[in-house]
Amino acid sequence: MTEPEEKLGSEVHPAATLLPWYLNGTLREEERQEVARHLRECQPCRTELDELSRLRQQVKAAYADLPGLSPQAFRSVMATIRDERRSQPERQRVFRWERAESSSWLDALDRWLRPMFAPRWVPVLASTLIIGQLALLLWVAGQEPAIAPRNIPTSTDGVVSRGIPTATARYRVAFQETAPEGKIRTVLHDIGGRIVDGPSPDGFYTIEVPASDQALLEKQLESLQRQADLIRSVERLKS
Amino acid sequence: MDTTHEQNIVEVQIMAAVASGDTQAFERLYHVYEKRVFQYVSTFVRDQTVAEEIVVDVMVAVWRGACTFTNTSRVSTWIFGIARHKAIDALRKVIRSEHESMALDNVAHLPNPAEGPVESIDRKQVAALTRQAIAKLSREHQEVIRLAFFEDLPYEEIAILLGIPVNTVKTRVYYAKQQLKQQLDRLLSRESVP
């Protein structure tokens, strides 16, 4: 509102400027009562009100008699709208004030995402992608049994899983004080074992190994017992 | 609660339907407003064909923009606001293309289907004289007379529509009414001379 305010002469009653709206019934209740009070006391304003009332009726009659639009205008508007509906059938139209009332983050996300689904081909593409992903997931799941055995340590397998196998055995081992750390690691690697406890006050460690084959365990124990330069004592713990 | 307020509540419901893409609701809104918008636009542009084209633009804009209606003003104020912008734009284009230097006030002209000789002053003739009187007012006065006396808009809504202070609306309507009365008295005294 940059326009300067237009002023009334001091002889004009402020209530007189409200009379058009007193007549059309759009004043707030307190204003309406104020004007009604003023009218009871002011003869010139009552005359003004009568004059305005007459003029208002004349203006209404003057405009009511005027011709309206041609039917062609209506056809033109409706044709434009039909064309737009054909090109944007899924257009989401929501009132702004309704949007303002529902302001949760979920609604915000919905408003952000919804236009992306406006083109007709987008839902088809999205469904195809979902079905494709599902198919890929099923295919990968079908491949898993071939991969899984490689994770289970065996005597020939250089890779040791850090997961705990379903069956394990334990050795109680005491290394020589002079045994280098690197060689101890090699021993552990060879048997696929890991230290799960120790050292105890007398220098014993508990080593856990996979126990899928009893014969293999026996061989492991013999192998460990033979390495006297590294291992002072070894025995199998009962599970 | 005034009748125009109740009418607005109904129109807000129609607008909600239009916003959701209901073409039947739009047709209803169209028929409520076509003539009113056409006449309002005619206070800006003289050429009735141009006025009709503007109304088509306005009604299509109402359809497209129904979802942007914020319900902070009456539906009528919102629609007349669109009409006002489009009418002033069209008027500027006409003035530019014709290289006319006339002020906007001089362009407005109220169509008058009954400008012939008057034999007696009956209701229709008074209406015709009133149209003549309104047509002699400035565009600004014609506009506020229409909005306050015919459209029955509250002064706050007129202020929003015209982008002017509320007190200016009151003052302008007051002086527009005085001008209209003077013009009418002049025309009536001319008609009554034998």
Image (spheres, helix red, strand yellow):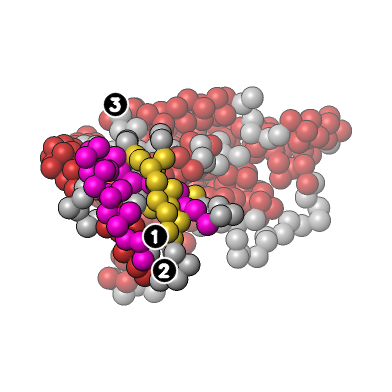
In terms of depth relative to the viewer, which is nearer, B167 or A123?
A123
Secondary structure, mark 1, is strand
Q: Mark 3 Cα within 10 Å, few/some/many (few <14, many 20+)?
A: few
Instruction: Tell me the mark number nearer the camera, choosing from 2 and 3.
Output: 2
Please state the chain letter of the residue tagged with numbered disc 3 in the rendered image: B
Residue A231 has which mark? 1
Residue B24 has which mark? 3
Is the same chain shared between marks 3 and 1? Answer: no
Secondary structure, mark 2, is loop
Please state the chain letter of the residue tagged with numbered disc 1 in the rendered image: A
Question: Of the residues shown, which amino acid type is indicated by label 1?
Answer: Ile
- Asked whether the beta carbons under mark 2 and mark 1 sit within 8 Å of each other, the answer is yes
Residue A239, image x, y percentages: 40, 34
Question: Is residue B172 shown above or below B8?
Answer: below
Stretch of the chain drawn in magenta: A203-229
In terms of depth relative to the viewer, which is nearer, B110 or A167?
A167
Residue B154 appears in the rendering: yes
Residue occupying image coordinates x 37% and y 29%: B17
Residue A179 has which mark? 2
